[in-house]
Structures are given as C-alpha cells and as structure tokens.
Image: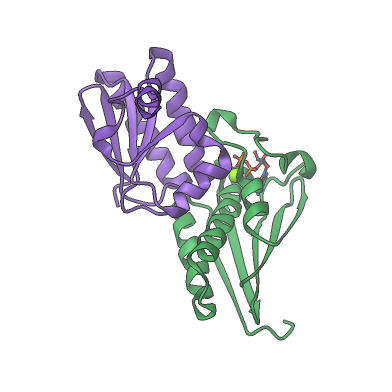
Chain colours: A green, B purple
Amino acid sequence: MENFDNEMRLTFQAKSCNEALARMTVAAFLTPLNPTLEELADTKTAVSEAVTNAIIHGYGETEGTVELWCARRGREVWFHVKDTGNGIADIKAAMEPMYTTKPEQERSGMGFSFMEAFTDELIVESAVGEGTLVKMKKVMG
Amino acid sequence: MQAAEYEVKGEVLVIRLKADLDHHTALSVREAADSLLARSHAKHILFDFTGVDFMDSSGIGVIMGRYRQVIFHGGRVGVTGVGANVDRIFRISGLYKIVENYQKAEEAFTCPAYERLATEN
Ligand SMILES: Nc1ncnc2c1ncn2[C@@H]1O[C@H](COP(=O)(O)OP(=O)(O)O)[C@@H](O)[C@H]1O
Ligand SMILES: [Mg+2]
C-alpha cells in the first residue's frame, strides 16, 4: 500500500482468548516508536474494544474471523479492526455512551466512547449482514 | 492462566486478579464470583488489581454487575492495588461514584465513608 514505514495484518478466530493476543500485537507493533506508557495503554484499550465488539456483537455465537491491520508512517499509526458478521443498523446510536444491545451480558456500552477518547480519529463503517470496519488513527507524541 | 484467585475473608469476597480484566477474563470472574456469593456469607466484594495494569470496558461491566448483586443486601464493592492505567479507566467511566478505592486491602470496608469524613474534618 501507500508507502508506510511498516504495516502488518493479523487474522484470528473470533474467540475471546484472542483479545489479549490483539493487544500484545499492537503493543509490539508500536515498540519502535517508543510510546509513552499512556499512549501504549490508550492504544491497547482502543484495539481491545474494537476486537471485543467484533467477537461479541459481530459474530456472537457464530464462528468467524477478525482481522487486525496496523500501519505506521512517522509518528502516525493506523489500526483497523474488521469483521464480516452482523453489522450495525444504526451507527450513530451505537456510538452513544452507555448504549448497548447486550445489557444481559453485562456490557457497559462504553466501548466506542473509549475508542473515541483514546485515539485521534475514529471512523466506523458497517452494513447489516455484511460486517463492520472500525478505523482508528493515533499520533504518537 | 487463571483469571483470578478468590478468598472469602469474613464478610468480604476478595477477588485477586491475575490477568488483564477484559471480556475474556470477565466471563470467568463473573461466574466464579456469583457462585461464591451464593454459597458463602460474603456481603462485600474487593477487587485486588495488584500486578494487573489493564482493564477495558468489559471490566466496567463485570464490576457494575457485581455491584448490582451486593447492594441488594447492603453490600459494597471496593478496589485496591489500582495502578495508573486502571485508575484512568475508573475515573473516565465514573466508576468511583459507586466503588471505593482503598490504598490498602486491609482498610477495605472497615470504616464507612461517613465515619472517615468525620475523622478527617
Ligand atoms: N463489530 C460490531 N458488530 C455489530 N454490532 C456492533 C459492533 N460493534 C459495536 N456494535 C454495536 O454497538 C453497540 C455499542 O458498542 P460499545 O460501545 O462497544 O458497547 P458494548 O460493547 O458494551 O455493547 C453494541 O452494543 C452493538 O450493538
Ligand atoms: Mg464494546
């Protein structure tokens, strides 16, 4: 793709044990940039939220694959999380703080709020029955 | 890896987290905590984060869920051993409104907030 300094793609089964795998992967990807502890925590949290959503809401009880793509150019880093699951009917409502469609599973509805708070750019693309692509960008200080 | 260790100390169920508190570990913590609450005399819950420095919004869900369980019987939820990253999540989410942060595990639930206020003033 467009000349990035580095780029990687990880695909994994939609299983909750892979949430930690995704966090460790982004942390390792960021290492050359010497991020602060806070930048590292922010990025891990944002990616963890997107990956968890793909697993719980995208696929639920059905099997599927989640894709994590990371790229960096200079101090700019992009993280995309993609699933080909259920999709989101109303993206605007879904992004409201405390909004959740799975309260019975003790979801707090704070996932998108954290992605927004901990990154510099958040774009959500989704279509019902096709899946969801969450694009995040963060500039390391 | 075991997500947490559990111990009932008098009226307090102590949950010593051993791994990041995410959706994956939240599921097992929720199940273990609820079964211990059902078959012990524990009234309060103390989450000990010592050594764990990651929690996301799934952690908020499991803590709020346990809070809803114990308040019915006058119980409370506390946390201890909270590091900078977990503290930030607690502050941003407003969880400290319902959960007390104790500097030391031994101080948990010993002194109600109003008593402490009285001694401070
Ligand atoms: N990848 C996804 N696929 C389908 N629905 C999603 C996806 N991500 C988020 N959603 C929807 O957006 C809502 C809000 O997400 P979020 O803020 O992370 O809260 P929570 O995960 O606690 O429900 C979810 O309850 C769900 O309805
Ligand atoms: Mg979520």
Along the line of sight, the residue nearer the viewer: B88 or B107: B107
Q: Quadrant of residue B29?
A: top left
Which quadrant holds the C terminus of chain B? top left
Q: Quadrant of residue A57?
A: top right
Can residue A31 be seen here?
yes
Residue for point 72% across, 44% down: A95
Along the line of sight, the residue nearer the viewer: B108 or B89: B108
Residue for point 42% across, 47% down: B21
Image quarter for ligand 2: top right
Q: Quadrant of residue A78?
A: bottom right
Residue A29, percent from left and from top: 52, 74
Residue for point 34% across, 29% down: B45
> In the rendered image of this protein, does residue A25 appear above or below residue B99?
below
Can residue B55 be seen here?
no
Residue for point 50% across, 42% down: B90
> In the rendered image of this protein, does residue A49 appear above or below residue A107?
below
> In the rendered image of this protein, does residue B35 appear above or below residue A98?
above
> Does residue B77 appear to the left or right of B106 in the view shown?
right
